[in-house]
Image: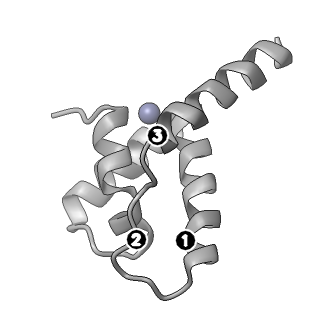
Amino acid sequence: MRIDCKHVWQYISAYIDGEVEAELRERIERHLETCEICSAVLDSTRNVVVLVGDDRVFELPAGFSERLHARLDREFLAGT
Ligand SMILES: [Zn+2]
């Protein structure tokens, strides 16, 4: 079973915290190797996690992915 970007985003905070099971973790890592968008999401999410510190109930703010996507689209367009 392949996971898509939405799955990665759903589990990304648990992934950063090391709270996903080994099999899922492996799938996420495999996806991240081939997906620039999710790698960027991972980096951004890590930064947010650092900002919120020890808040274990961290969730992506509403609209976070959409804003991030809009930014990524611009950056990809600018880079080509
Ligand atoms: Zn992806």
The one of 54 and 23 positioned closer to us in this rendering = 54
Residue holding disc 3? 63
The residue drawn where x is 45% and y is 68% is 16
Query: x, y (%) of residue 33?
Result: 51, 41
Name the foreground residue: 2 vs 80. 80
Residue 59 in which image quadrant: bottom left
Amino acid type, mark 3: Gly
Residue at 84% x, 16% y: name it: 78
Give residue 37's position: percent from left, percent from top: 56, 33
Q: Position of residue 54 (x, y in %)?
A: 48, 88
Q: Are marks 2 and 1 in contact (CB under 8 Å)?
A: yes
**Quarter placement of the C terminus:** top right
Q: Nearer the viewer, mark 2 or mark 3?
A: 3
Question: Mark 2 touching mark 3, by CB under 8 A?
Answer: no
Mark number displayed over residue 58:
2
Amino acid type, residue under disc 1 in the picture = Val
